[in-house]
Amino acid sequence: MHSTNKFKGIIISLLVLGSMLLLSSCANKEIVTTCLTGHKFGFLGGLLHGFIAPFDLILMLFRNDISVYASNTNGAWYALGFLIGSGGWGFFGGNRASRKRN
């Protein structure tokens, strides 16, 4: 009886994986070469984009011209600023929020 539940789980997982693969194959290819000219965003741009990322994510669901992550960046410095701005390392939460007060 236990092996049939395991078999069902494997079948369901394969169906979900196959569905995701099938749906992702229909995605449009975006041409971004025009986005890569002009101003390059650095650390401060990444920090700002990290702060507004939750709002961008919500707006991205309704508009096609909004993106969460900038295409035209200077690389690692932008990524570091984005990570810090989005709270990816927990700088703004910390362990003080979970301490009990006496």
Image: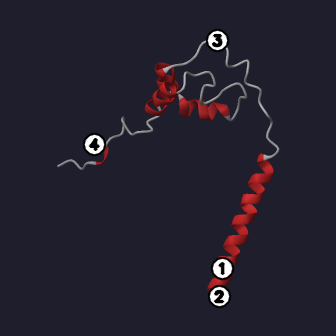
Secondary structure at numbered mark 4? helix
Q: Earlier in the sequence, mark 4 or mark 2?
A: 2
Give yes or no for contact between labels 1 and 2 (Cβ–Cβ under 8 Å). Answer: yes
> Crowdedness of circle 2 by 10 Å Cα count: few (<14), some, many (20+)?
few
Give yes or no for contact between labels 3 and 1 (Cβ–Cβ under 8 Å). Answer: no
* Residue under label 1: 5
Nearer to us: label 4 or label 2: 2
* Residue type of the residue flagged with mark 1: Asn
* Residue nearest the viewer, comparing 78 with 68: 78
Q: Earlier in the sequence, mark 4 or mark 3?
A: 3
The span from disc 1 to disc 2 (Cα, nearest Å) is 7 Å
* Residue type of the residue flagged with mark 2: Met
Give residue 87's position: percent from left, percent from top.
43, 36
* Residue under label 4: 96
Nearer to us: label 2 or label 3: 3
Question: What mark, if any, has residue 1 been given in the picture?
Answer: 2
Nearer to us: label 4 or label 1: 1
